[in-house]
Amino acid sequence: MSLTRQDVEKIAHLARLAITEQEMPVYVTSLSSIVNFVDELSRVQTDNVEPMAHPLDGQHQRLRADVVSESDHHEKYQANAPAVQAGLYVVPRVIE
Amino acid sequence: MLHTLSIGELGKSLKSGQISSVELTRHFLSRIERLNPALNALTTLTAEQALAQAAAADARIAAGVQGPLLGIPLIHKDIFCTDGVRTSCGSRMLDNFIAPYDATVVARLKAAGAVMLGKANMDEFAMGSSNETSFYGPVRNPWDTAKVPGGSSGGSAAATAARLAPFATGTDTGGSIRQPAALTGVTGLKPTYGRVSRYGMIAFASSLDQAGVFARSAADAALVLQAMAGFDPKDSTSVDTPVPDYPAALDGALDGLKIGLLREFFEGLEARNSALIHDALKIYRSLGATTVEVSLPHLPLSVPTYYVVAPAECSSNLSRFDGVRFGHRCENPADLMDLYKRSRGEGFGAEVKRRIMTGTYVLSAGYFDAYYLKAQKVRRLITDDFRAAFARVDLLIGPTTPTPAFAIGAKIDDPVTMYLNDIYTIGANLAGLPGVSLPCGFVEGLPMGLQLIGPHFSEAKLLNAAHRFQESTDWHRRAPRGYD
């Protein structure tokens, strides 16, 4: 199954990826070839087969008591931020 | 020479005072300085911290503290967060990222006294089978520097094969420890999913990722796994099951061991590759094992299944890289959408973007059932095939890779051709099974690996079978010329 340029533009938008004009045809070709490759799965008989999200059976989400166990490392963890002000992450204006 | 000794031998020398950890560390640092430029196996060198860690190890040894990894140098794949040290994941996106904490794997090996020499180069965000997608340039195979070392843990594999460190950590999501181990002639172990903590290990595909080890022997790998394995409350997928004594299990007899030959692995396998595996089987039979053919009919679907599941999970995991809190941010973003799109467009390389988009597509409305849900069902069929096989045999055997190391640049332009390199390794990731690759011979002067796969939590048996093979052969002792 081939993907069109519009398909790839839509996917890139959903994925929040800027694809340049030069890159676009390469991605259309390679994504089409990958989707074509995985289309083989559509021919497999899977009626009554449970989907498998996790490789080990019998696992469940562990819970713990709702008590504070960590201490404040705000400054340390924010040291990698591109733009910070008063402990907040600075981004372009979101609300008009 | 110090770089030819096993971890056990180094431990003895350190304990007896014959050598110090500082001397040992200097030895490997000087090898890295001299030999790494031709390989590009490291992204970050931590020479000063290494010498400080070595001095601390020497003090502990002098005070009578014992431990098999105390004072032993290592290299960490640059996917593990290392406190205060850059953790790039082979990507421009994290080129400026200084990890603010240690991954559990890093913390455990540090507590055991191992000395970190630096961070290993890798395919970007662990996506690749050749270490050609790294932002920092390709890693070269020490056996032939025009060839790839495999990936994504190419740097860890090349560094171990070049004897730049006695061992290295790696991760394996679709074969990224076992495949490069095979292509560089070293021993590479992927544990059972959930055996080793993923806390602080930058996530690619959360239901497939697993941390493991590169070493020059199963005996060395056993010592390292012992320190890495075990329940971690900080990893919600960590399994709370006791860790056996891996080194103690190495010497067990193989009488009665039933080894299954995976029929699907041998179909279409090149004659020279097949001959090496059959030679290995002769050795296993001489050690008391019996062999029987088994069939896993859904196994050929592993690669397409993986290339739906792994990209889907990666598209979700990599959504955190948004230019807001850490990592690359584009200049002068016009608005929030522009910030996201250009930071991510600039920060990620082509293969990563391909996989994010593949994942986004298979998870999108209208396609989720046909692709993602379908792949999860096929994943169960593959897993059930393995379960049926392990009802009849103890371990499965086959080649690790279809060919020896290929030339840098040969496959990078066609994603699907590259993906087929993982044809023998991916099944074990989908089923969460442990696997080990060990050197089993050479084709055209390049190393080849044989792969053993076991049931969940059978690492002791795998290492035992690998160790006994290595006692009867010397493939694992061969070193590339110039690195011996």
Image: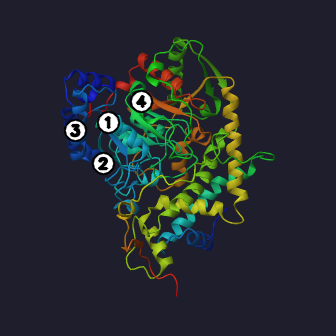
Residue at the image position 30 percent from the left and 48 percent from the top: B40
Secondary structure of the residue carrying tag 4 is: helix
Q: Nearer the viewer, residue B156 or B162?
A: B156
Q: Which residue is mark 2?
A: B40
Secondary structure of the residue carrying tag 3 is: helix
Q: Which residue is mark 4?
A: B221
Q: CA distance from mark 1 to mark 3?
A: 18 Å
Secondary structure of the residue carrying tag 2 is: loop
Q: Earlier in the sequence, mark 2 or mark 4?
A: 2
Q: CA distance from mark 1 to mark 4?
A: 14 Å
**Do the residues marked 2 and 3 share a common chain?**
yes
Q: Chain of mark 4?
A: B
Q: Viewed as shown, does residue B203 lie left or right of B47? A: right
Q: Nearer the viewer, mark 1 or mark 4?
A: 1
Q: Quadrant of residue B290?
A: top right
Q: Nearer the viewer, mark 2 or mark 3?
A: 3
Query: Residue B366's x, y, as percent?
Result: 72, 65
- Give the mark count: 4
Secondary structure of the residue carrying tag 1 is: loop
Q: Amino acid at mark 1?
A: Ala
Q: Earlier in the sequence, mark 1 or mark 3?
A: 3
Q: Which residue is mark 1?
A: B114
Tell me, for residue A18, which label it has, or none.
Answer: none
Tell me, for residue B31, which label it has, or none.
Answer: 3
Q: Chain of mark 2?
A: B
Q: Nearer the viewer, residue B295 or B222?
A: B222
Query: Residue B197's x, y, as percent?
Result: 49, 42
Q: Amino acid at mark 3?
A: Arg
Decide: few, some or many residues near mark 2? Use Cα within 10 Å; few <14, some 14-19, many ≥20.
many
Q: Nearer the viewer, mark 1 or mark 3?
A: 1
Q: Nearer the viewer, residue A13 or B10?
A: B10
